[in-house]
Image (cartoon, helix red, strand yellow):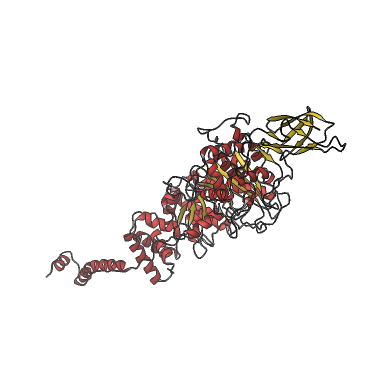
Amino acid sequence: MTTEWKLAARIGVRPAMAAALALACLAAPAAALALKLAIARVELPPLQPETGTIVLDRNGVLLRPFTVADGRWRLAATIDDVDPLFVRVLKAYEDRRFDAHRGVDVRAMLRATWQMVRYGRPVSGASTLTMQVARLLSDESTRTPTGKMKQMLTALALERRLSKDEILNLYLTLAPFGGNIEGIRAATLAYFGKEPRRLTPAEAALLVALPQAPEARRPDRHAESARAARDRVLKRAVAANALADDDARAARSEAVPDRRQPFPMLAAHTTARRVASHPDISEHRLTLDAAIQTRLEALASERAAAHAPFVSAAILVADHKTGAIVASVGSADLFDARRNGFVDMTRAIRSPGSTLKPLIYGLAFELGLAHPETLIEDRPVSYAGYTPGNFDREFHGTISVRRALQLSLNVPAIQLLEAVGPARLVARMRRAGAALVLSDLSPPGLAVGLGGVGVTLHDLTAIHAAIANGGKAVRLTVDADRPLDATTPKRVLDERAAWYVASTLTGASGPHHVAPGAIAFKTGTSYGYRDAWAIGFDGRHVIGVWVGRPDGAPVPGLVGIDAAVPILVDAFARLGTTTRLNAAPPGIVDATTATLPQRLRKFQSPNTPRVADAAPPEIAFPPKGVRVDLGMKDGDAMPLALKVRNGSPPYTWFVNGAPIGTAAFGGALSFEPDGPGFTDLLVIDANGASAASTVYLE
């Protein structure tokens, strides 16, 4: 007799019962082994469900989330992203023994079965959070015994593969919250307009209640049902000591949200372009600042509303020391079809108007052709049929280079560009990172300086960023993970030339509320009033502003000083404190026009033919001391021809001390003498040099 039979006989167990007990003892290990093998054979669904791409700002603030392929809002979330209050209430309501069980809570199943038998209806559930995750992953029905068994096996397998935190992370990502909302992060954004890091007890309880019946309890459609479910969660949370009674009482007095909030969509054009260019990245971090982006998007919308319905606006802000783009507003309103809000006007190719003039003047300073106090002529000129004129259709005569740039005069700018060379201007623009659109049929001409080239707001801002950065090129970027460029930056301008430009632009005429010297800025208006520009910088930031119609149609009366500069000034104000401009570098020539070196006092293009420095004037005819027969004896005297060589025109002639006229070029002049005799001749050139002669006329 075996030991089991002897034991059974000793305690008085009948042989049949002893046999059953022995079989049970043998079956239990076999059942455990079979369960273990069944769990091992479970083929788990993918444990990394598809989640929407998100774009964050420099501080980790959400700029814009994107839906998954089927249009559902499902954003990845972990317990580190969620208020601990929510996790505490969730466990208290859904799965008190979550931290202890192995995926299936046998105790809860027995309790639920007993309650079903006793009351004839379900009183409490036995589904653990792990089992709910198993159902969410497979998306299969659990209403049949087979489906339920498969769910339990999957839950057991999950517990063996994942940690408790990883299982909770899956629940936080996949739980349904009504409509196309999945996961707690999407839910808090949709219903509360915020991230789930900080939740009130009322918010936490509502979020716990919704996944149980997401469509029947949607607060935006069934507010009363949502409130009732939330209050039941609060009651159970108090009973489980997960929430204080006073907090629950206050939470029950709060209203539930009755509408969905729009998801964040800051920098819509930039974020869409970024995601499209890197589709394999699920989380993008940009250099943008969400707070500043929000303020500037509001600014663009406000100012565009003051114009015609088809007018839009764009703003670009960058740190000109690092190249990091702080804000990028592509249009006044993304969804305004009349303003073509879908067009990103920071990247649209437009005519820059006068905004390239600072670089023209900077090149003239760098090449030693001019100084801010150099005088230049603002008079009608013609270059092989090209006759530039000023915007106001007036000419200002002799004016300083500084004032010419501040007034944005066209004629002086073209004179300087003719001396500098359009090819050099184009080369420096490209060195600054600008991708220009030029004609393939001919080399760049003088018209480039007044807007005869295609350029974007992004590239114009980069050009002015180089000027603000002491002449060094800086690559503008929105990529927060871009490593710093270790190569030596390209030189767009000499440091001194860049400072001359900046100091000149701080004195440009602008709105009355612009503090003198606070920012350096330049305006521009393209041909036909199609584009209004304002580009400005202080010691840290450079801002570019564009106003106009995205379709390129003209807007009568639209000019940079009136339409774009006020936006520029307000944009700087919404950035915060203005940073002082760079101090003057060594080698700056601080002088007035009169104290400049002679060659810099008045601009003279090196391309204009010059007469070599002339010798003092000489009277070529009549020679000194000669007798000149003019036919006076016959009573029919001829006029005396006067000629001069050397010297500088114009020439002024004197006969016997009295002026008789001025000769512009060649110095030739004639006069009729009063009578015969000795005559004194004198000629004076433009420099004051003179020559004298005495002749005898007869």
Residue 228 sits above or below residue 378 on the image: below
Task: Evaluate whether residue 517 shows in this view.
Answer: no
How many numbered callouts? Answer: 0
Report the residue at 84% width, 37% height from top.
Answer: 637
- Which quadrant is home to the N terminus? bottom left
Residue 480 point in image, percent of width and height? 46, 49
Give residue 369's position: percent from left, percent from top. 58, 39
Task: Work out whether residue 339 or residue 564 is closer to the camera in this orientation and state it.
Answer: 564
Which percent across, then down, holds residue 63?
52, 51
317, 295: nearer the viewer:
317
Q: Quadrant of residue 515?
A: top right
Specify whether 306 is left or right of 349.
right
In the image shown, does 88 or 278 lie closer to the viewer?
278
In this image, 233 relative to 222: left or right?
Answer: left
Residue at x 73% of width, y 41% of height: 395
Give the residue at the far front of this rendering: 633
Pick out the residue farthest to the right. Answer: 635
Residue 527 visible from this viewpoint: yes
83 vs 617, left or right, is left
Nearest to the observer: residue 630 or residue 514: 630
Picture quarter containing residue 145? bottom left
